[in-house]
Image (spheres, rainbow, N blue to C red):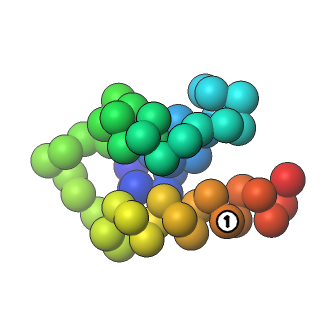
Amino acid sequence: MTYSEATEQVMLHNGYFAPLKLIYREIWNYKDKTEITGKTPDMTILDTIVFIFANF
């Protein structure tokens, strides 16, 4: 699972509301730390949040 997919899952499971602190804490519930793929977490999280709210 990519950072983007994991971020989306955190937001979906929190009613589309997830402060960055919550995303950083819960992202590892969905993403395996040994399989790191994608951009850096900070940029991916920002891109995902912008994308979700642009399409909301």
Q: Residues within 10 Å of mark 1 (few under 14, many from 20)?
A: few
Residue situated in front as seen by the camera: 41 or 1: 41
The answer to whether any part of residue 53 appears in the image is: yes
User: Residue at left 35%, top 61%?
Assistant: 41
Residue 27 lies, with reference to residue 40, above or below; the image says above
The amino acid type of the residue labelled 1 equals Val
Q: Tag count in the figure?
A: 1
The answer to whether any part of residue 38 appears in the image is: no
Q: Secondary structure at mark 1?
A: helix
User: Residue at left 34%, top 35%?
Assistant: 25
User: Residue at left 67%, top 37%?
Assistant: 17
Residue 41 lies, with reference to residue 7, above or below; the image says below
On the image, the x and y values in percent for residue 47 come to 56, 69
Q: Which residue sits furthest left? A: 34
On the image, the x and y values in percent for residue 40 come to 31, 69
**Is residue 18 toward the left or the right of residue 45 in the image?**
right
User: Residue at left 69%, top 65%?
Assistant: 51
Residue 32 in which image quadrant: top left
Identify the residue under disc 1: 50
Residue 31 lies, with reference to residue 35, above or below; the image says above
